[in-house]
Amino acid sequence: MMAWLFRILSALVVMVVICGVALLMLPGDRIAQVAVDQIRAQTGRDVVLRGQTTVSYYPVLGVSTGAVEIANADWSEAGPMLVADSLKLGVDLMSLIGGDVRITGLEMVNPQVVLEIGRDGRANWELGVDGVAPSGQPSGVSTALALSLDRALITGGRVQFTDHASGARHQVDDLSLDLRWPQYRGAAQLALAARPQGAGLISLTGEIGNLAALIEGEGTTANLEAQANGGTLGYDGGFAMPLDLDGRLSVNLTDTGAFLAALGLPGVDLPPGLGRQASATADLRLTPAMDLSLRRLALTLDQNSLDGAVDVALGQDVPMVNATLSSGLIDLSTATASQDAGGTGGSGVADAGWSQAPIDASALGLFNGRIDLTATGLRVAGLSFADASLTITVDRSRAVVALNRLSGYSGGMSGQVVANNRNGLSVGGSLRATSVEMESLLNDLAGIDRFTGKADTDLEFLSSGNSLHAIMNGLSGKGSLSMARGTIKGIDLDSLMREGLATGGTTVFDSLSASYTMENGNLFNSDLLLRLPVISASGEGRIGLGARDIDYLFTPRTASADSGGGVVIPVRIRGPWADPRIWPDMEKAIDLNLKAEKEQARQAVEDKIRDELNLPTNEGQSLEDAAKEKLETEILKGLGRLLR
């Protein structure tokens, strides 16, 4: 396409040269015909000039035309390849007399360009005209006639592109260009603006080191900056066409969502910490096949900074990304905190419940690929870890985070977490933790600080929903927990068992184990076993993960109680996580401790009834069955007397 522009420009220059040397006295329409012949010779396409053609001679030798049309390829059905409302060209007369061609001005108003690729792969901008060099200059044209351009202006342009083989269609509107090119083999300054279809206005400013080399298909250098709503991109390095870059990239996005919308990707709302504001520098390599590589990458996403290398295949419908990144502390706590509704601390525990604000998971569909990440620290969902090694794979809006190594809470974790947004958001995973400190873990996770001690735990979970509230209320799965020595704050089971007091204190236990299932946001446990030096305790109940409440029964037993000589006083824990009520369940205590007395009383009553009714005592026969049998016998006897 650059060759196209150069050929048209060369034809116009020849026309002006003819005007200055031999046709000073010819009318404008005759000069216009000379221009038409020159452009037709350069491009092989018919040219139509409409309106009056005027010529100026001093101090600037120039031509101004009305509407201009350049025909399309003979196989196209889209109409003219180029249409413009007007065209103006001026040449410095004194430079022309001295043997140089210096264009003082070139202006094109409202050009409409149609670019096409046919079903057979032919492009309508490929000319193939005999006698025209690939550079766009006619064969035998000396570089002594090389051009310079004080200023070129294009306003109100439109470019339409159609690939008839693939069906792809693109359009760029509001195209404008301000180009200054004082030396043919020198640098050119440009200011380009355009509005791609479905996108915002994008501008490109900067300098091309050798525009002539670029036109002739050679490489050059460029220092460019692209601007759009929300940020800028800068580039400094090697430049060739088709797009071939090898240089240094700089990025500064003050609003990533707005910037992506300006590029035609609206509606992307990245969570805090993942790049609502972003900046980066890197060594960039971009090939004509749209394969991008970034080396010596320094990336900042909100409060998080990363280093490493990234490869991106941009030529695919969804970019394919492969990256190796390292970081210090990665803080994603604000990403989950934004989903909380007035929560306290990192857990988001509050009377209002889990946030019902919609979760935007559209970012999962921005790319496919794999990211290997190491970090010295990680904060996420209210939890804090150290020495993290993660592998993140994304495939068609489904992300899997494999925890290769994750240290924290005095222990370690492994497993994987999955987020799937293919048909609505769902989350799941399997995790294993070893030797983690429960006090700090439960406090960060759920605001619970009553348990201390190190634990091993397994967890499998699954849920779905478009909000944190829906996910927590839909949790299902299973898991287990085992702890060695630890404490339970807020109750002293030893004092409760010895003195019947439940007014606070701390329980020190030797071991704790439990398994559980989850369904509809509720955790159910029936096999808790807690061992103290002289006391053991079992437990069963429900923990509302969605409702953030608890209804649980602890049943402590002394060694003497197991042998029938002690008292069992169950402890009920009920209420919201933030302030549960803990009290001895006396009704349950009566049931457990007076079981023998109740059985003795029941037996005495049965014996009394048998004596009063003169019921037989058959082994294995209940009082109810004996009474029923006695009643049936007496009824039969009564009926017999009536019949006699």
Image (spheres, rainbow, N blue to C red):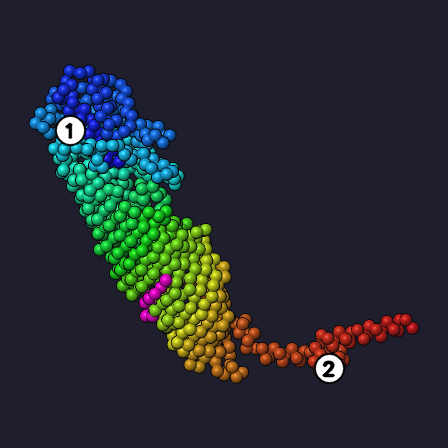
Using the image, determine if residue 69 lies above or below residue 460: above
Among numbered discs 1 and 2, the one appearing first in the sequence: 1
Q: Nearer the viewer, residue 542 or 108?
A: 108
Please provide percent x and percent y for residue 477. 47, 63
Q: Residue at x 19, y 43 (%)?
A: 219
Residue appearing at x 24%, y 27% in the figure:
41
Numbered range of the magenta stretch: 402-411
| Camera-side mark, 1 or 2 | 1
Query: In the picture provided, is 345 more to the left or to the right than 189?
Result: right
Give the residue at mark 2. 618
Seen from the viewer's position, the closer of residues 329 and 553 is 329
Q: Main secondary structure of the magenta part?
A: strand
Q: How many marks?
A: 2
Q: Position of residue 69 (x, y in %)?
A: 29, 25
Please state which amino acid type lies under the numbered disc 1: Ile
Q: Is residue 469 visible?
A: no
Label 2 sits on a secondary structure element that is: loop
Question: Which residue bears the numbered disc 1?
Answer: 103
Crowding around mark 2 (Cα neighbors within 10 Å: few <14, some 14 to 19, many 20+) is few
Determine the residue positioned at 60% across, 79% down: 597
Q: Does 91 sit left or right of 41 as displayed? A: left
**Label 1 element class:** strand
Type of amino acid at the residue the image marks with label 2 = Asn
